[in-house]
Image (tube, rainbow, N blue to C red):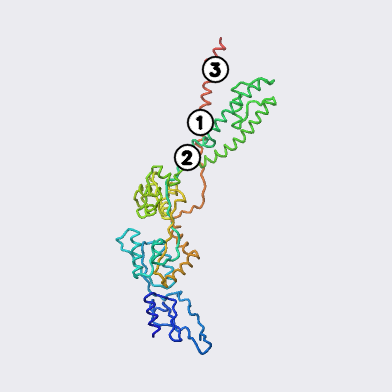
Amino acid sequence: MEALCIAQELWKSIQVINVVIVISSEIYTYFPYNSLKYCGDIKEVNLIDIWDNDNGRNFVYEENLFPDKIPKHFHGCPINVSVGNNSTEEHNIGESVFKSLNLKVTYLSADPDVTDRFERIRMAMQYLVFGNSEIAMGGIPLVVDITMFADHLFPYFDLQYKWFVPCGKLQSRIDTPLRIFSTSVYIALVVIILLLNIILKLLSKYSEERPSGIFTLLYNIWAISLGVSIEKFPCSYKLRILLFSWICFSFALNVIFQTFFTSYIVDPGVEKQISTLEELLESGIRFGYRQVEDRFYKDSSFRVHKEISRKRENCERSDCIQEIVDTGKFATFGEVQAVENYIDDNDVSNLVCVMNDLDTFTIKPVAFGRKGSIILSALDRMFMLYIESGICNKKYNERNMKHKKVRQEEFLVFQIKHLVTAFCALLTGCFMGLMVLICEIINYRYVCRNQIVK
């Protein structure tokens, strides 16, 4: 009876679990949550060994004085769990763990009139500290301030917060040829063609062949550049060597040009999008996010973060994302999975993009328990098994995969719009050819005929 009183006092005052009580030569201990009748109460003590002075000063039973007292199941014992913010993923994981440990759970939710997320977390932790609940969970982040008066479980998963900005717009296919080479390359090609024309003209004067006109030479050089046949190949070996060199150069240039030209026609690329916070501020576009997420920047010592907090607009997550979709001149900051779910549900993945992976904040949601709680130790062991086996990730992904639209196959339908540049060049060439033909007809009718008559 004396050992039971000592055990009850130790458990009631400081909830010490690894206790050995020595009464004369008898050694006692206790096992909380040993059955449904003794849920969290000490109603009996267990004699684990006896010290025998007459037998060489040995223990009679030689039992382990500190056995594992963390039960693998709690026989349906009741437990109060205070909930800060409702989280489907955490609730599913918690329900599975509580069921595995055979715990009867009663949830204590924060006042429904309180909408501030941090105030709800404070109320959940208040229930825990004042002894109204054994566990506090529901969107509670792992922060140092809370660990000073409560123990935490292993984090279930990571929640990442990133910036989302308008995606870069598709570049025009009309100016595709101009983007293949730089302006200096095109200028150099024009200069080379003119120099080659002059050199060929000079060399043709010293050959035995009838010299060609300067426009004929220019026509032949341009024909070689485009990879088509020329009017006549010269007999002079000097001219042949020069033209053959130009043929080789034009062939290599055409291969490069056509490769990039085809690629740009299919995928013209996108314009540069905002990629840093500095660019976001310099761009002058509006940006905003929820009030609760301003804590990432409000207390920061960085100049850019302070400016972000000062200039940001207050808007709900869905409204912020929709503003990006509608205007293309807005940016927002939010939890990655929630934003991606909204993007997938509304099929706007081509309009809203992640700014970068550097300006990222990671939150580790955890459950907290009273310091030294035996239930917390059992929960932590079970949570570790769930995490290491991948069950937590599975439950987290099961919910999020409902929002993903898995495409069975991806292909590109080659359409007329992909050949806009080619058709523009063709129509330009046809128009120029038509104009030259008209000029030739006019020249023949009014100039050459008058000369013949005279």
- Compared across the picture, whether 316 is left or right of 190 comes to left
Tell me the SS state at disc 3.
Answer: helix
- Inter-mark Cα distance, 1 to 3: 25 Å
User: Residue extending furthest left?
Assistant: 113
| Towards the viewer: 226 or 68 | 68
Q: Is residue 35 above or below residue 140?
A: below
For discs 2 and 1, the disc positioned in front in the rendered view = 2
Tag 2 and tag 1, C-beta contact below 8 Å: no
| Towards the viewer: 352 or 387 | 387
- Inter-mark Cα distance, 2 to 1: 22 Å
Q: Is residue 292 above or below residue 5?
A: above
> Mark 2 Cα within 10 Å, few/some/many (few <14, many 20+)?
some
Residue for badge 1? 427
Name which of mark 3 and mark 2 comes first in the sequence: 2
- x, y percent for residue 388: 50, 65
Task: Report which quarter residue 190 is drawn in.
Answer: top right
Check disc 2 and give the amino acid type.
Gln
- x, y percent for residue 9: 37, 79
Check disc 3 and give the amino acid type.
Tyr
> Mark 1 Cα within 10 Å, few/some/many (few <14, many 20+)?
few
Name which of mark 1 and mark 3 comes first in the sequence: 1
User: Residue extending furthest top?
Assistant: 454
Measuring 62% from the left and 34% from the top, which residue is drawn there? Answer: 251
User: Residue extending furthest bottom?
Assistant: 54
The numbered dot on residue 444 is: 3
- x, y percent for residue 267: 51, 42
Measuring 44% from the left and 80% from the top, which residue is drawn there? Answer: 20
Residue for badge 2? 171
Check disc 1 and give the amino acid type.
Leu
